[in-house]
Image (spheres, rainbow, N blue to C red):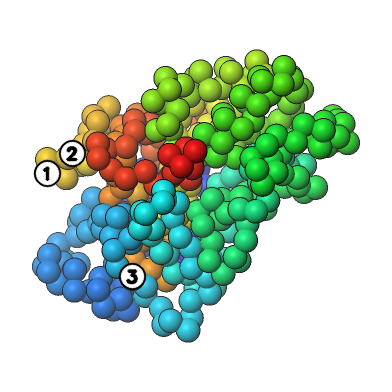
Amino acid sequence: MTYEEVLALPPFGVTREEKQQLIYEELLRLTEQHRAHCAPYARMMETIGFSAAGVHSVEDIPFLPVRLFKEMELRSVAEEDVFKTMTSSGTTGQQVSRIFLDRGTATNQQKTLVRIVSDRIGGSRMPMLILDCPSVVKNRAMFSARGAGILGFSLFGRKKIYALNDAMELQLDAIRAFLAEHAGERILLFGFTFMVWQHFYKALQAAGERLDLSNAILVHGGGWKKLASEAVTPAAFRAALRTACGNLDVADYYGMVEQTGCIHLECAEGHLHTSTYADVIVRRPLDFSPAAFGERGIIEVVSLLPESYPGHALLTEDEGVLIGEDDCPCGRKGKYFKVLGRLKQAELRGCSDAYAAAF
């Protein structure tokens, strides 16, 4: 099955039985493809004695620890076919992941993001308020995760403005003018969680300002570690923003540069959803066996997207719990889950958390 055929499937309309077969077949194909074209990956598969004959389910596909992309150059295409290199977020002194994309994989990332996000916010482009500063988007050949996030979500915006200047100061006059120009229209806001809190919500508070964004949707992501340490829960985050901005729709997402495009977006019920093109497995920390629904464990993310590098099955450094599958009240099919936080002693790596550490 080609990835174009996979993308033609509804992003949240495939039931468990059909999806598991699809994911199983495609992940096995990707494993063999990367084993044939990425020598370090092939050596790892040889070391663990991997054999396709021993794979009977999605859970049997060998995973890589996500940190490995900080330590090794892993690509399954020739160097001259690398169209774009993406880097993860990190604090000063941290190594960053390097993800190598050919044109086909980069194009499929955009198409996948559009399919997933349009299901939540609609297919029409909206006036867009980016809750960040313009200097983040610099080198178009070497994207940081933060810059890639902004550019990726800019696909859903028109008449875009940045809410902050390069000193991370809120530009209230420009925002007021923007909202006046688009009065009555639905507005898209995008930003990373800590920056939304620190440089948007707190700045509005300090200025004694209240904006009418009741006809807006805010999409945010990048980690909660810093805000959790300040006892700011997702519920408190939403409630605070609504006191300052009206009854705006707020949607968190879970994603990473190693699987850009295949994000897990929050529905109106507050659940993070896996799409048709990806899945989540929660594994027990002692033996990495699959955990049951409701059981805390380490999150593994799988994706059908990565053709140019072996990032199709990755063990993250996050803890989470599977809540259910195919039965969310929002009506979307697939697994839905909750992220509980970073593993102890794991590095900060989300855009929001890495910026917060530096801040």
* Type of amino acid under label 2: Arg
Residue located beneath label 2 in the image? 284
Residue 209 sits in quarter: top right
Which residue sits furthest right?
Answer: 181
- Residue 354 at what x, y percent from top left? 44, 44
Which numbered mark, 1 or 3, is in the foreground of this view?
A: 3
Residue located beneath label 1 in the image? 287
- The image shows residue 204, relative to residue 71, as above or below, that is above
* Type of amino acid under label 1: Asp
* Type of amino acid under label 3: Leu
- Residue 345 at what x, y percent from top left? 25, 40
Dividing the image into 4 quarters, which one contains the N terminus? bottom left
| Real-space Cα separation, disc 3 to disc 2, in angstroms | 27 Å
- 143 vs 321, nearest the viewer: 143
Number of residues whose C-alpha sits closer than 10 Å to that of mark 1, classed few (under 14), some (14–19) or many (20 or more): few
At 43% from the left edge and 81% from the top edge, which residue is drawn? 79
- 321 vs 146, nearest the viewer: 146
Residue 240 sits in quarter: top right
- Residue 45 at what x, y percent from top left? 18, 68
Residue located beneath label 3 in the image? 74
